[in-house]
Image (cartoon, helix red, strand yellow):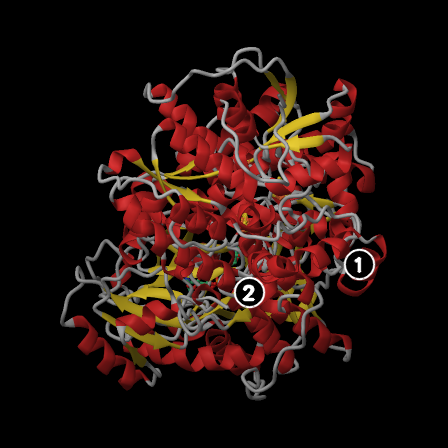
Amino acid sequence: MTDHDQPVYDLSGHTPLIEQAPLARQAAFSADHCLKCNICTAACPVAAVTPLFPGPKTVGPQAQRLREPGQPSPDHAVDYCSSCGICTLVCPHGVKVMEINTQAKARIVERDGLSLRNWFLSRNELWGRLGTPFAPLLNFGVRSRLLRLLAEKLFKVSARGPLPGWAGYTFRGWWQREQKQHPRPAQHDDSQRVVFFHGCSTNTYEPFIGKLAVAVLEHIGLHVEIPPQTCCGLPAQSNGDFDAARCYARHNIEALADYARRGIPIVGTSASCMTAIKGDYRHVLGLDDDDAQLVAVHTYDFMEFLWKLHQEGRLPTGFQPIEREYPYHAPCQLKAHGFGRPVLDVLSLIPGLKAWEIDADCCGIAGTYGYKAEKRAIAELVGWPLAEQVHAAGAGTVICDTETCRWQITALTGANTIHPVELVAAAYGLTITDKAYTPPVGE
Amino acid sequence: MTPTAVDVLVVGGGATGAAAAYDLARRGVRVLLVEQSDLSTGTSGRYHGLLHSGGRYAVGDPGTAAECITENRILRHIAPFAIEDTGGLFVATPDDPADHPARWVDACRAAGIDIDALTPAQARAQEPALTPHITAAYRVPDAACDSFDLVHGFVEAMRALCAHSTLCGDLLAYHRVIRLVTNDNSVVGAEVENVRTGDRQVIHAACVLNAAGPWAGMVAGLSGITVKVKLDRGTMVAMNTRWVNTIINRLRPADDGDIIVPVGTVAVLGTTSVTTNRPGDHHVENWEVSKILGEADAVIPGIRQGRALRAWAGVRPLYEPPDIDHGDTSGHGVQRRFAVIDHRVRDQLGGLVTVVGGKLTTCRLMAEEAVNVVCDQLGVDTPCTTAAEPLPLPAFRQQYHRLDHRLRKLEHGQLPGQLICECELVTRPQIEAAIAGYGDHPVALDDLRRDLRLGMGPCQSGFCSVRAAGILHEVKEHSNLKVTRALKDFVDERFRGVKPLLWGHQLRQLYLDELIYRRTLGLDRLIAPTPEERLDS
Ligand SMILES: Cc1cc2nc3c(=O)[nH]c(=O)nc-3n(C[C@H](O)[C@H](O)[C@H](O)COP(=O)(O)OP(=O)(O)OC[C@H]3O[C@@H](n4cnc5c(N)ncnc54)[C@H](O)[C@@H]3O)c2cc1C
Ligand code: SF4
Ligand code: SF4
Ligand code: SF4
């Protein structure tokens, strides 16, 4: 075990920071703005497919008025909220509905405790690292229908939930070896440096995405730093385990604050991790201090960052043409950034490449939600409109920024899924050495 | 069936009259409680919601302070169903007179009020919304009290007593006393008018107890005598959420906007003190709202930016003995002690007793002392026993003061059926049951509001009133026109409460409600109901 498995801050016995922030700045307070217009209810992908969930307005701003501050939540329907964040995005009055719901889920955990299953799902960072040496064995287990059915029976982890496979090595380990073998020249100009936040998935399941990201950033001419970091904490947060989520968050804020202070951008290829750092640390977990704000301001989604460089005239545009057409799914976590569709913007710079956005809010998986046996059917129904459009277009490959969404889309449609960085790297003519990786556009 | 003769006719179905009627029934006296509107619709239904510890009066009015703490303990014992034990805090800010807390502490000790000194940090740990700039903080045994539940508790207890005996004790709602019948320097009954039908009838009584609150002067005047009641209007503002779970009092000499009371889903901020000459003066002035929000903001920073739901006013009936003239235009300085006037002694008019002044907190004591005088006139010598025995749990009670109560019930399947008022969680079966409870009597949507909190949430009936009107239509089989008018009355009344708060959130909400009711449903194009029709609907 490494140091960041230990709680960084012991929060027991203290009023959670969320309750120390001035009331008017807390997400719960935004319930005051609700006009009952039902726009969020109409947009919620979960409420649309199941009667078990009465919808964002009901479990959010409405129920919030009836929850005793500091007391466990008296309700349970809010557990069916997937925390996809669409409600917060569409609310015209600034109600932080998803944030309110997520906090209510944490209150339920305070009341009922965290189930073993949810504890398990919240610790993907740990499983990723612990499982790496046993990759072949575990990958067999993940693919075994029988073992998955057994896991569903015993732990209520859906047998149909698209679990990833272990790479067998970590991205961080690769980076250390890589730097030894090919030392990078020192870079003293902070404006030429960038921090890469890889997240757990890239570290242990899909290291090739990190390698591509590093290749692209270095091709642009930036010096890449990969400081120690841990899980963004989003899985723990959406399972209501705020203590764990706050520990992860604190650890990352500490690791990144110094870079942020020096104005060095922090970029990541997992849109959901970046959402957590940009917004959730403050609005959901209530870690609303100067460092958290500073880190949030300097954090960018990978494609958002590339587009920003382009607007500043710093992005090399010598792209090779890619004569292909792909549907693109913008994960709800990415929509929550509220920055438009930088993926489509950047890909439009590649000659010949056509990417079009699928008209669907959510793929259904919403982090760990779609892995829960009782919610798997909901997750599949939510993802159905997306799957239909992929089928109708006859697309064999779909672009998407977030790992769990990609796995879900593959599970729903059978289509291959790629991260946009794969196309950017290909268009720059960059290659990486990775036997598990096949570039989307071959020779 | 309305009796034509009783021992005592009590005028006024507020806290004082209801407590008196209950007290009389316990002493075996035949009593009829007459109320011109519904129970608890006078000052008792428009008050701040605070079961005083007495702390507020300790310095300026020690007698009332001592009464409050005694009655506070008694009401907790006899009517726990109406009380949420929030506890109270007195907090001083740097703007408040620095020498006041010391005087206040001594006065509280003298009045027998248990106070606990807290450090500012302790106070903020208990109530994180409080300003960090607290200079002194004390804990007091304040509580939140639902007057509706309390008044219903008294009335149901009175009825229960009479069900087991040949005595009668009943309530005559929607009847106004319009004349006191006198005979040889004695009041021998009253003429009452059904405010809905205009029918009049005389009820004979050996004694009339005038507990008409702000109207007490008018009722006494019906027999040609003068009772000087100083009418003092106070405004309150309800916020969308509770903000605090403890009652917060400002530790300074009593002034406007000193108190924040968490009640059910809301926090009630108040209040002001403005002399008026009408007992039904419920208007709210803009300066009062901004003053109240400003003062609250000094104690809870940011509350001013919160959503204010509704503002309303009530009129305090303060009694001024004829020989005292304060020359004080604000009512904060006037003593809150109540008075029981034996008109046989003061005006040589038998058969009439007036009780006026005081607080809701002291309603039981006021009733006891008034009933003592009444019994003296009647020659009844049974002592008062209302302080000893808890009231039976009223069947008809709201139980809204436990914040999470309804949400818990709804989520555990104990509130089945369609959700009609989404803000306050009122379901269709609840509305149907409430309508059925009125039997053949007419039902206004506003009655359902008082019974169920229908339309009291953030949208102020924007979404539920039209649904509730539909249910009323189905159950009562009223004509379309009649129900539509009932809807318009309700919506108009709700809009009235929002008008003093038309900025920010509530302005947006009202505009949305306006679009629904006036633009989409075209409520305004309906012919305004005639006064008779209005009473009927
Ligand atoms: C703004 C404000 C805040 C207050 N806050 C508090 C507080 O926090 N704590 C506290 O303890 N006290 C408080 N008080 C004081 C308290 O509300 C009153 O003292 C108490 O409610 C008075 O009750 P009552 O029964 O005497 O009068 P009311 O409740 O006014 O009852 C009198 C009744 O008589 C009826 N009536 C009048 N004329 C006739 C007639 N001719 N025929 C038939 N019926 C008639 C009226 O309809 C009315 O219902 C507050 C008062 C105000 C105005
Ligand atoms: S939360 Fe926003 S979108 Fe939802 S009902 Fe309220 S105001 Fe409308
Ligand atoms: S976060 Fe997503 S699932 Fe949850 S209420 Fe909002 S829209 Fe619905
Ligand atoms: S989303 Fe991740 S789990 Fe996910 S991960 Fe981000 S860093 Fe850890």
Distance CA(mark 2)–CA(mark 1): 88 Å
Q: In this rendering, would A346 be left or right of B427?
A: left
Residue type (three-letter) at the residue carrying disc 1: Glu
For residue B505, what is the image quadrant? top left
Percent of width and height locating residue A72: 57, 65
Frontmost residue, B526 versus A139:
A139
Q: Which chain hosts label 1?
A: A
- Residue at disc 1, secondary structure: helix
In the figure, B328 relative to A92: above or below?
below
Q: Quadrant of residue A436?
A: top right
Chain for numbered disc 2: B
Q: Circle 1 sits on which residue?
A: A152
The answer to whether any part of residue B280 appears in the image is: no
SS of the residue at dot 2?
Answer: loop
> Residue at label 2?
B183
Residue A333 placement, left or right of A388: left
Horizontal and vertical percent position of residue B160: 72, 74
- Quarter placement of the C terminus of chain A: top right
Q: Is residue A275 visible?
A: yes
Question: Does the numbered disc 1 mark a residue whose Cβ is under 8 Å from ligand 4?
Answer: no
Q: Residue at x 77, y 79 (%)?
A: B164
- Drawn side of residue B182 relative to residue A255, left or right: right
The extreme right residue here reads A146
Q: Position of residue B321 (x, y in %)?
A: 30, 67
